[in-house]
Structure formats: C-alpha cells, structure tokens
Image (cartoon, grey):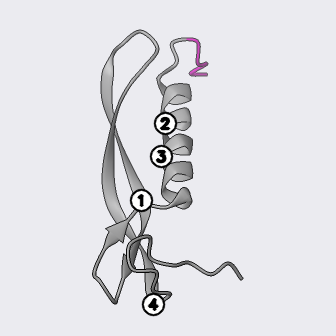
C-alpha cells in the first residue's frame, strides 16, 4: 500500500476524503463551461493542511475529457 505524507510537515497522519467541486473549463472553440465532479483531497491531521494529490489531477482530467465528448457537435444522438 502506498504511504502518503504531508508535503509541509511530513506527517503520515493524513486522511483522504471526497468533496463536491466544480471545474471551470473551456472547449476547443473557447466556450466556457463548468463541470461538477467528486474530487479526492487529502488533509493532514497534524498541521491541518489540505491539498490535492495525483488522484485529484486524474479526476479533473477524466471529467474534462468526458465533458468534451458529451459537448462534441459530432456526437451521435440516435
């Protein structure tokens, strides 16, 4: 199992939780839109720092790619 540590104090007393968030994005033609998503975040119990790790970046990228496919004008609606 991968061990996680706080990037500020180095404590291993960290916990992950999932929060509701919204990602502001733009499609390839510049049309702005928002994407609702569930985002995994970390919190250090020692120093109270909250941060996003690699899991959050992957969740944002996946949500963005999915939203672009859904917004595609070439998408079949049959």
Q: Earlier in the sequence, mark 2 or mark 1?
A: 1
**Left or right: 38, with 77 as reference point:** left
Camera-side mark, 4 or 1: 4
**Left or right: 57, with 17 as reference point:** right
Image vertical order of residue 32 relative to residue 6, above or below: above
Say which of 54 and 59 sits in front: 54
Q: Earlier in the sequence, mark 3 or mark 1?
A: 1
Q: Earlier in the sequence, mark 2 or mark 4?
A: 4
Disc 3/disc 1 C-alpha distance (Å): 9 Å
Q: Which residues are magenta?
A: 74-78
Image vertical order of residue 7 relative to residue 32, above or below: below
For disc 4, the marked residue is: 13
- Secondary structure at badge 2 equals helix
Residue name at image x 58 percent, y 12 percent:
74
Disc 2/disc 1 C-alpha distance (Å): 13 Å
For disc 1, the marked residue is: 38
Say which of 11 and 44 sits in front: 11
Check residue 64 in the rendering and tell me which mark sits there, or answer none. 2
Number of numbered discs? 4
Residue name at image x 52 percent, y 18 percent:
72
Image vertical order of residue 26 relative to residue 23, above or below: above
Image vertical order of residue 8 relative to residue 67, above or below: below
- Secondary structure at badge 4 equals loop
User: For mark 4, does the 10 Å Cα neighbourhood hold few (<14), some (14 to 19), or many (20 or more) residues?
Assistant: few
Q: Position of residue 1 (x, y in %)?
A: 71, 83
Check residue 60 in the rendering and tell me which mark sits there, or answer none. 3
Q: Earlier in the sequence, mark 4 or mark 1?
A: 4
Camera-side mark, 3 or 4: 4
- Image marks 3 and 2: residues in contact by CB distance under 8 Å: yes
């Amino acid at each position: 199992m991968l061990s996680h540590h706080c990037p500020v104090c180095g404590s291993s007393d960290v916990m992950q939780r999932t929060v509701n968030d919204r990602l502001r994005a733009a499609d390839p033609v510049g049309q702005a839109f928002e994407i609702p998503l569930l985002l995994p975040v970390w919190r250090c119990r020692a120093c109270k720092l909250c941060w996003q790790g690699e899991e959050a970046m992957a969740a944002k990228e996946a949500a963005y790619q999915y939203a672009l496919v859904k917004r595609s004008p070439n998408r079949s609606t049959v």
